[in-house]
Image (cartoon, grey):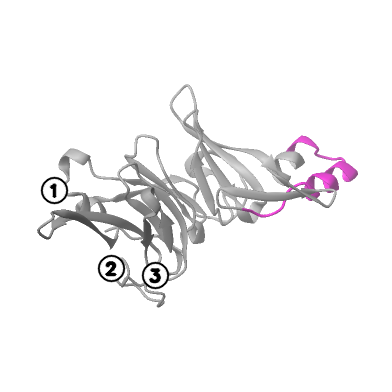
Amino acid sequence: MARSARDNDERWIGSGRRGHVDGDARDAELNRPFGVCAFRNGTLAFTDTHNNAVRFVISETRRCGAMSKTRRRDFVKTAACSGLLTPKGIAASSDERHLFVCDTGHHRIKLAALPSRSALVDVGSIADGVEMFAFAGNGKKGWRDGAALEANFNSPAGVCEYGDGSIIVADTGNHCIRQIRRTVSGKLVVKTIVGAQASLEATRGGGNQRRHAERTANVPVGNRVSGYRDGAHSLF
């Protein structure tokens, strides 16, 4: 995995060998990394799908030599939390205090609480204080809207925070886009907003309309959701 940064600087993460080894970024071993997000300070968080883990790429800058030139090294650290199964999509909240993680194999969305910046001994310790909580989904594969922890997902694979604070999920196995938002009373609810399931709800009982609705959504993955209508690809 590589990322282009300022001044044409490139960051290479991973040795190319399949495995699960932390340490120097170029020597680290990954196993099917999928989702990645960046923090404003340059730290990266990514899902390592087949290692069932959230991992961080942390930079350390040092001055060296007589000319006191700065040199940056990247390190990979695995978050000290467990319970994920083939996680895919990942996104940071706007205040960078939380991560939203698609716990794809468990058909859930998880919330990872990051340690307070003031509590960090150094930026490298961010991976040591992560706490993971259930955010949406009851763990059973299916399609069901309603209260967040009672809703059903089917292999969600993409997630992002929208400008209004709601969370948007690519519910891959259900071929639709779901929204997680907080009501006036403070409760989190899940609602299908785009895709076959949303269309089917609006066209119950109409055979031709139902078949047309089923054709309007393909498999959404990650932050880009591909679909088709009448055979022509379109962006949802």
- Mark 2: few/some/many CA within 10 Å (<14, 14-19, 20+): some
Q: Is residue 186 above or below residue 87?
A: above
- Please name whichever residue, 1 or 85, is drawn nearer the observer in this view of the structure: 1
Q: Which residue matches tag 1?
A: 121
Check if residue 217 falls in the magenta segment.
Answer: yes
Q: Which residue matches tag 3?
A: 30
Q: Quadrant of the N terminus?
A: bottom left
First in sequence: mark 1 or mark 3?
3
- Magenta-tinted stretch: 201-220
Q: Which residue matches tag 2?
A: 22
Q: Is residue 206 above or below residue 44?
A: above
Residue 74 on image: x %, y %: 28, 60
Residue lying at 66% horizontally and 46% vertically, measured from the top left:
176
Residue lying at 40% horizontally and 65% vertically, measured from the top left:
52
What numbered label is drawn on residue 14? Answer: none
Residue 16 on image: x %, y %: 41, 75
- Please name whichever residue, 61 or 176, is drawn nearer the observer in this view of the structure: 61
First in sequence: mark 3 or mark 2?
2
Residue at disc 2, secondary structure:
loop
